[in-house]
Amino acid sequence: MHDYLAAGPHPGVPDGYVVLPKGLVESMPLPWQQAMVQILAEFHQAYGHLDWPEYRVVPSRREKLVNLDEEQLAEVGFLVEIDVDGELVYRERTGKRIENPEDTEVLVSCLDPIPSQHSNANEDTPPRGFPAQQSWR
């Protein structure tokens, strides 16, 4: 498992976690789901005794600091102000100035592009990942 995860990048595998969108897992072919259930049941049996925190997963995307509005800047812990020369200055909440804001990327929340449990993930996408041909009636 370590070798596979380290060979990334893989979607849904940030440092320290593996995130599987429930809508996609529930839309997998039934044999895959059955195998996943078996693996998860064994995993939870082995590690269920640990004091698990609750996890909050937020869909996010990488954005350059200079492309964020004030609300997004606040969300990720940064401020922007105009200095005495009329230039924009980006700062961390601590007041530390960001020297190269145009080169600084941060994770900002976004709408989840992965289909939810209320839509069939395979409806418009055949197994090879190409959009299905639309039939016009």
Image: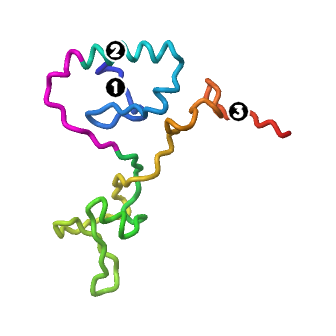
> What amino acid is found at the position of numbered circle 2 in the picture?
Ile
Crowd rating for badge 2 (residues with CA inside 10 Å; few <14, some 14–19, many 20+): few
User: Which circle, 1 or 2, is nearer the viewer?
Assistant: 2
Of the numbered discs 1 and 2, the one sitting upstream in the chain is 1
Q: Are marks 1 and 2 in contact (CB under 8 Å)?
A: no
User: Which amino acid, by three-letter code, is at mark 3?
Assistant: Ala
Near mark 3 (Cα within 10 A), the count class, few <14, some 14-19 or many ≥20, is few
Q: Residue at x 36, y 33 (%)?
A: 19
Q: CA distance from mark 1 to mark 2?
A: 17 Å
Q: Which residues are magenta?
A: 45-57
Q: CA distance from mark 1 to mark 3?
A: 30 Å
Closest to the observer, 1 or 88:
1
Q: Secondary structure at mark 1?
A: helix
Identified at 67% across, 35% down, the residue is: 131
Q: Quadrant of the N terminus?
A: top left
Return the residue nearer the eye: 120 or 92.
Answer: 120
Q: Quadrant of residue 84?
A: bottom left
The label number, if any, that marks residue 5 in the structure image = 1
Q: Are marks 1 and 3 in contact (CB under 8 Å)?
A: no
Q: Amino acid at mark 1?
A: Leu
Position of residue 35 measured from the top left corner of the image (x, y, whole percent): 42, 13
Residue receiving disc 2: 39
Label 3 secondary element: loop
Q: Nearer the viewer, mark 2 or mark 3?
A: 2
